[in-house]
Image: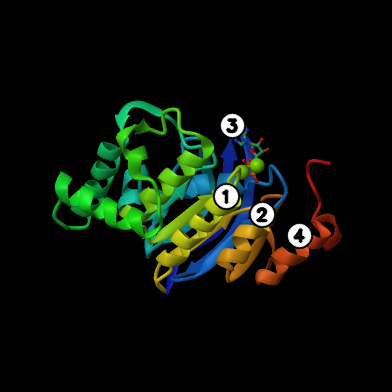
Amino acid sequence: NTILKIENLEVNIKDKEILKGLNLEIKEGEVHALMGTNGAGKSTLVKALSAHYDCIVTGGIITYKNKNLLDLDVSQRANEGIFMSFQSPIEVPGVNNSYFLKTALNEKRKYNGLEEIDAMEFLKLVKEETAKFNIDRKLLQRDLNDGFSGGEKKRNELIQLLMLKPDLILLDEIDSGLDVDAIKTVANVINSMLDGKKSILMITHYDRLLELIKPDFVHILNDGKIVKTGDYTLALELDEKGYEAIGIKDENK
Ligand code: ADP
Ligand code: MG
Ligand code: MG
C-alpha cells in the first residue's frame, strides 16, 4: 500500500523555485533516504510535506493515505500521523514541554476518535517508552526546546516520536551534531518503530545512521528533482566517490 505519493511537485521559497517537478512514492513500511548537495532542496521537500510556512506549493499533487495532503493544515497533518523532525527545532519559552506533548498526543487521539489520556497515564507511558531506550525524561519538565542543546533537542524529538507513534516520519538531519552513542539511540528508536506499516523519509549526509537504519531506497535530489534512485549501495557509492563522480552537478560550485 502506498502511504505517500508525490507527483510533479513544485515548491517556491521566497519566489525562488526550489522543487521543479519532483516525484516520489513511499509505500507502507519502507525507509527512504534523501541525499543531495547543500541547498539542493531536501529540507524544502520535508517542510512542504509538513506545511511549513516557508514553502509555497505552486504545482503538483501530494497524496497521503489516499487524501489530498495539500488540503490539510499543519495540525491535521500531524493528527493524520505525519511527524517532522526539523533541522533546527524552534524554542518555545513559556510552554512546558510535558504539557505540550500531552496536548499534542490528546489532540491526535481525539482526532482519531480515541479517548484522551490523563496526566497519570501520560506519565506512565512516557516512563515506559523512555526507559526502553535509556532516554532521560527530565527534558519534559523544562519549556519546549528552551535552551536545549542540539543533542537535547534531538532526544526530545525521540520522546515525541515514541509517544506520538506517527505513520510517516520525516527526519531532517536528526543525526547532525550527535555523538556516536546518541546516533545509536536514534537508530534504536527508529528501528523499533518499523513495524511494517510506518514509513520513513530521512535526510542525512552521514553513513553511520544509514548503516544502522539501512534504508530500502536512496534518492538523490538535484536541480529540484529526484535524479537518481538506488538501494543502500548508492549511499555507499556516494560516500566513497562524491556527487560529481556519479554525474551529479554540485550547484554550489
Ligand atoms: P538542503 O536542505 O538540501 O540543504 P534547503 O531545502 O534548505 O536545501 O534549501 C534549498 C534552497 O532554498 C537553498 O538555495 C536555500 O538557500 C533556499 N532557502 C531555504 N530556506 C530559505 C528561506 N527561508 N529564505 C530564502 N531562501 C531559502
Ligand atoms: Mg543544508
Ligand atoms: Mg537541509
Q: Which residue bears the numbered disc 2? A: 206
Picture coordinates of residue 247, whole percent (x, y): 83, 60
Label 4 CB, ligand 1: below 8 Å? no
Q: Are marks 4 and 1 in contact (CB under 8 Å)?
A: no
Q: Who's the residue at 28% across and 52% down the image?
A: 127
Q: Nearer the viewer, residue 172 or 15?
A: 172
Q: Who's the residue at 45% across and 65% down the image?
A: 199
> What amino acid does circle 1 point to?
Asp
How far is disc 2 from disc 1 in space, using C-alphas? 8 Å
Q: Quadrant of the N terminus?
A: bottom left
Callout 3: SS: loop
Mark nearer the N terminus (2 vs 4)? 2
Callout 2: SS: loop
Q: Which residue bears the numbered disc 3? A: 14
Quarter where residue 235 is shown: bottom right
Q: Are marks 3 and 1 in contact (CB under 8 Å)?
A: no
